[in-house]
Image (spheres, rainbow, N blue to C red):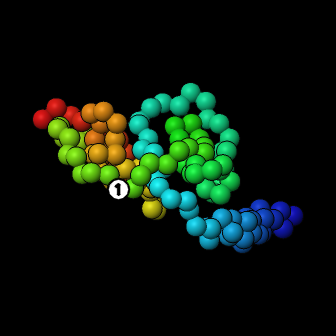
């Protein structure tokens, strides 16, 4: 009866060795030109299954990008964006991201729509409403 306690451990080890093999081809594929559009913070009411795993599964110039409720094929934004500093300050971030290398969804204020600023969040940079200075 002692072997029953070892079985789940063996299954987890087997899955751990297979997992990198299943996504090996996706990591090596180059991405399409442009950058995923910046995400604005919003609440998702219903998550949707991913439309893609790489840019090459998307039609035309579209890129495989994280969206509010899942991963979708979206039109890219140009990488060269002016560094238009917008008024206001970024909100103070409380907490720490549990991901190892979180993605940045913007680099500069000029990539964000309207009055939104590119600010550091718990997990990478995102476009968010500034705090009045």
At x 39%, y 56%, the residue is 79
- Residue 111 at least partly seen: yes
At x 60%, y 43%, the residue is 72
- Residue 9 at least partly seen: no
Q: Residue furthest left?
A: 133
How many marks on residues?
Answer: 1
Res. 89 image quadrant: top left
Q: Position of residue 113 (x, y in %)?
A: 34, 36
| 33 on left or right of 29 | left
Q: Quadrant of the N terminus?
A: bottom right
Identify residue for label 1. Answer: 80
Q: Position of residue 68 (x, y in %)?
A: 52, 37
Q: Residue furthest right?
A: 1
The answer to which of 96 and 61 lies nearer the viewer is 61
| 62 on left or right of 80 | right
At x 34%, y 41%, the residue is 112
At x 68%, y 54%, the residue is 57
Q: Quadrant of the C terminus?
A: top left
Q: SS class of the residue under badge 1?
A: loop
Res. 110 image quadrant: top left
Q: Position of residue 19 (x, y in %)?
A: 70, 66
| 22 on left or right of 66 | right
Q: Position of residue 54 (x, y in %)?
A: 63, 57
| 44 on left or right of 40 | right
The answer to which of 84 and 117 lies nearer the viewer is 84
Q: Residue furthest top?
A: 45
The answer to which of 94 and 112 lies nearer the viewer is 112
């Amino acid at each position: 009866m002692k072997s029953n306690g070892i079985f789940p451990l063996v299954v987890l080890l087997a899955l751990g060795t297979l997992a990198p093999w299943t996504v090996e081809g996706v990591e090596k594929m180059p991405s399409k030109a442009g950058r995923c559009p910046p995400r604005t913070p919003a609440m998702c009411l219903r998550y949707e299954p991913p439309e893609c795993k790489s840019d090459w599964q998307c039609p035309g110039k579209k890129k495989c990008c994280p969206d509010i409720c899942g991963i979708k094929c979206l039109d890219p934004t140009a990488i060269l964006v002016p560094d238009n500093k917008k008024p206001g300050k970024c909100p103070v971030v409380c907490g720490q991201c549990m991901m190892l290398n979180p993605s940045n969804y913007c680099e500069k204020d000029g990539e964000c729509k309207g009055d939104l600023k590119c600010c550091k969040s718990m997990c990478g940079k995102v476009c968010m409403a500034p705090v009045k200075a």
